[in-house]
Image (tube, grey):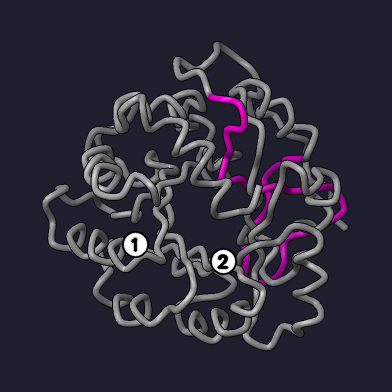
Amino acid sequence: MSEIPANTRPLEGPAPKLKAPAGATDCHIHLYLPGYEAQPGGPRIPELATVADYRRFQKWLCLDRVIVTQPNAYQLDNRALLDALTQLGTDTARGIAAVAPDTPIDELRDWHEKGVRGARIMNLPGGAVTHADMLAVERRIRPLGWHLMVQFNGQYLDDYLDGLRRIEGDYIIDHIGKFMPPVPASDRRVDEILRLLDRGNVWFKICAGYEASQTGGPDYADIGAIAKRVIDHAPERIIWGSNWPHVGVPREQYPDDTEQLDVLLDWAPEALHRQILVDNPANLYGF
């Protein structure tokens, strides 16, 4: 087994400008634990990101709850995710797993007891489960009340619309729709996202604007315009995530972690901050 270096990413610094309310939930992180290696088909793991590391990061941003997402590196091997959830505890943590259409239901029930509440669909390079299996996975997890977390390049939304409309349970449109490159907020594909939200089973995650933005921080204005329109349209369906530890981003381009939270100061009225950070995640994840 190869030795994966310890974390060297910043875990503390100046406080965010946004003071997170009690119960604030980080709805998107990845953890990389000692003893678990990247699987074939997934990207390499440059550094560990342990529960202890995240606890320091969590304290820095004054966050209380967390959703751990299965990273591409581990593909369908969810052991590290389940280990992390055991360490974190179900009082304040939930998980999103990589689920195959034939994953045994007894296995899924065991994961549910450990805190898993959803399945990841990743339509970008390195994804373990893609759109091709999305509806089969959704049928598999539906009896448990889980949701799908779906990520794709929003530029190609038309390719996914039919499948998304056929999902019967809840699902999340991840990473602000991840339009690469960004489109105007008035773009017809943003109109389609609003129509999907109007169906009542869709959530929209504010997360990782830096991955697609061409204008950059601190306000990520090009991505922010999309986010503002969606937040204004359906504030009751919005959640937020830090995307820590930003795996795959070169260190010289590493994002400012406080900016990832502080975008809400610009993108959402103060009256909505508690709803986005506390109430909506509590509704979706059962805190």
Residue 157 placement: quadrant: bottom left
Q: Nearer the viewer, residue 102 or 4?
A: 102
Please say if 241 is above or below 68: above
The x and y percentages for residue 97 are: 66, 65
Q: Please report the residue visible at 63 percent of the width from the left and 20 percent of the height from the top.
A: 60
Residue 11 placement: quadrant: top right
Tally the numbered discs: 2
**Magenta stretch, main secondary structure class:** loop
The x and y percentages for residue 105 are: 75, 83
The x and y percentages for residue 7 are: 73, 34
Residue 218 visible? The answer is: no
Disc 1 residue type (three-letter)? Asn
Residue 104 visible? The answer is: yes
Per the image, the residue denoted by label 1 is 153
Q: Give left or right: position of 40 versus 149.
A: right
Per the image, the residue denoted by label 2 is 120
Q: Please report the residue visible at 36 percent of the width from the left and 24 percent of the height from the top.
A: 270
Select label 1 or label 2 by which is in front: 2
Magenta region, residue range = 21-50
Q: Residues within 10 Å of mark 1 (few under 14, many from 20)?
A: many
